[in-house]
């Protein structure tokens, strides 16, 4: 990976360049939920050409980064106390923390609330319980979505191997060996957004790049994928604010 930067106005924009083997045919620029800028380029590209391509898209990159900064101003850090709202499948649920040293700790969804029973009100303890609960829900929801889409990508009609991995900059990824990695915090998003990420990664089993053919497959699987992606991008700060 190459680390580079360009100047746009009064701002220096840093980015990483990843040179990928064929069939990567063109330079693809990605602005990640945490503000990282990643560039994919064909493996035999000249670095000067890649930087020139980034400069051509500098205004778009800056506008994406500026929108993320504005969204971040409205996101408060989590305290894991009663009264907070936490997302699950796109809906907000009020957190209610119950202190009880006589029963096992647990999390349950009840009448629009996330009820956490715990032996300690320490935020780290409540957070750990919620994270475990989110991972369990993510296993269930992602398995359902993968099963519903698998018929589009595999002769066996079964879901490819996959696992959960908490990531700071990605919702999902597909390894060269065909294993999917999905971010458990994605389960906070609406199901339509989850379907977009799963479909995106499944299409990488066919085209391990972001070429026009990749987007043809994605459009065939999810004609409205762009609207779903835009919705997910718009709430990334809230979803990743743990």
Image (cartoon, rainbow, N blue to C red):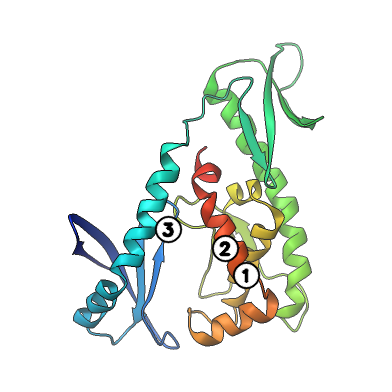
Q: Are marks 3 and 1 in contact (CB under 8 Å)?
A: no
Q: Residues within 10 Å of mark 3 (few under 14, many from 20)?
A: some
Q: Residue at x 74, y 59 (%)?
A: 143
Q: Nearer the viewer, residue 67 or 187?
A: 67
Q: Earlier in the sequence, mark 2 or mark 3?
A: 3
Residue at far right of view: 111
Q: Position of residue 202 (x, y in %)?
A: 63, 73
Say which residue appears at 41% left-offset and 50% top-offset: 68
With respect to residue 190, does 224 lie above or below? below
Q: Nearer the viewer, mark 3 or mark 1?
A: 1
Element on which disc 2 rests: helix
Q: Which residue is mark 1?
A: 225
Q: Is residue 55 above or below residue 7?
A: below
Between the residue at mark 2 and the residue at mark 3, the CA separation in whole angstroms equals 12 Å
Asked if residue 209 is positioned above or below residue 73 in the image, the reply reads below
Depth order, front residue of 67/136: 67
Q: What x and y, as percent, mark residue 132?
A: 64, 37
Q: Is residue 5 above or below residue 136?
A: below
Residue 110 badge: none
Is there CB contact under 8 Å for labels 1 and 2? yes
Residue 182 seen in the figure: no
Residue wearing tag 3: 32
For disc 1, the neighbor class at 10 Å (few under 14, some 14 to 19, many from 20) is: many
Q: Is residue 175 visible?
A: yes
Which percent across, then down, holds residue 67?
Answer: 41, 52
Of pointers 3 and 1, the one earlier in the residue sequence: 3
Residue at image location 73% in from the left, 79% down from the top: 152
For the N terminus, the image quarter is bottom left
Locate residue 68 relative to residue 117 in the image: left or right. left
């Amino acid at each position: 990976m190459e680390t580079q930067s360009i100047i746009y106005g009064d701002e220096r924009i840093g980015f990483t360049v990843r040179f990928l083997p064929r069939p990567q045919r063109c330079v693809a620029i990605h602005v990640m939920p945490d503000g990282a800028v990643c560039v994919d380029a064909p493996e035999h590209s000249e670095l000067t050409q890649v930087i020139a391509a980034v400069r051509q898209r500098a205004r778009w990159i800056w506008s994406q980064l500026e929108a993320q900064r504005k969204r971040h101003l409205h996101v408060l850090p989590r305290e894991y106390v009663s009264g907070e709202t936490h997302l699950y499948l796109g809906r907000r649920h009020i957190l209610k923390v119950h202190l009880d040293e006589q029963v096992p700790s647990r999390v349950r969804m009840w009448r629009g609330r996330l009820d956490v029973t715990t032996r300690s009100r320490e935020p780290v303890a409540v957070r750990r319980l919620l994270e475990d609960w989110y991972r369990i829900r993510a296993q269930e929801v992602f398995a359902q979505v993968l099963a519903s889409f698998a018929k589009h990508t595999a002769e066996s009609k079964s879901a490819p191997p996959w696992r959960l991995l908490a990531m700071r900059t990605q919702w999902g990824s597909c390894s060269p060996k065909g294993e999917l990695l999905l971010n458990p915090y994605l389960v906070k998003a609406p199901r339509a957004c989850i379907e977009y990420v799963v479909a995106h990664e499944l299409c990488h089993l066919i085209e391990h790049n972001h070429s026009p053919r990749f987007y043809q497959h994605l459009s065939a699987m999810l004609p409205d994928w762009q609207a779903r992606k835009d919705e997910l991008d718009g709430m990334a700060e809230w979803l990743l604010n743990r």
